[in-house]
Amino acid sequence: MKPYLLALGAGLVVGIVYSLLNVRSPAPPVIALIGLLGILAGEQIVPIAKRLIGGEALSLGWLKHECGEHVFGALPARADDKAVSRDGGTSA
């Protein structure tokens, strides 16, 4: 139940922001996509801030692992990678 209430609260906040910007929902496609991009980027701020506050360094590998797949989705693998993962060995 808690995730539903959190989603409702977040939706109310976004609705208020849309109203303040005089954008009606459903938003025009470009505005909606830019809003979704902002949501995805905003979600990455918390783990990055936690890491920095904890005194840990940010590395490119960590950013790719923690943020990359969430923002960009699972990127398609190369044909060689698929062959290796299927048979457990290298493709000849």
Image (cartoon, rainbow, N blue to C red):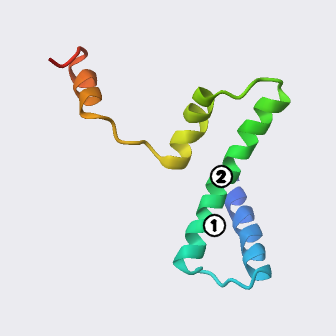
Residue 31 image offset from top left, x and y in percent? 60, 74
Q: Which residue extends farthest top?
A: 89
Marked residue nearer the N-terminal end (2 or 1)? 1
- Mark 2 vs mark 1, CA separation in Å: 10 Å
- Residues at circles 2 and 1 in contact by the CB criterion of under 8 Å: no
Residue under the point 66% across and 60% down: 38
- Tell me which corner region of the image, top left, top right, bottom left or bottom right, holds residue 55: top right
Amino acid tagged 1: Gly
Across and down, in percent, residue 5 comes to 71, 59
Q: Which residue is drawn at 58% across and 27% down?
A: 61
Residue nearest the viewer, comparing 2 with 87: 87
The amino acid on which the numbered mark 2 sits, given as a three-letter code, is Ala
Asked whether residue 1 appears in the rendered view, the answer is no
Please rate how many residues cluster around mark 2, counting C-alpha atoms within 10 Å: few if below 14, some from 14 to 19, many from 20: some
Give the vertical position of 74 relative to 82 (above or below): below
- Residue ranking furthest to the left: 92
* Location of mark 2 (residue): 41
Q: Where is residue 84 in the image (x, y as percent from the top left)?
A: 25, 21
Tell me the quadrant of the picture where the C terminus can be found: top left
How dense is the environment of label 1, judged by Cα within 10 Å: few (below 14), some, or many (20 and up)? some
- The mark total stands at 2
Q: Residue 35 carries which label?
A: 1
Look at the picture and state if 74 lies above or below 6.
above
Residue 27: image location, x then y, percent: 59, 79
Q: Which of 53 and 15 is in front in this view?
A: 53
Q: What element carries label 1?
A: helix
Quarter residue 35 falls in:
bottom right
Identify the element where label 2 is drawn: helix
Identify the mark at residue 21; answer none if there is no mark: none
Q: In this view, does 1 lie above or below 16?
A: above
Q: In this view, does 1 lie above or below 20?
A: above
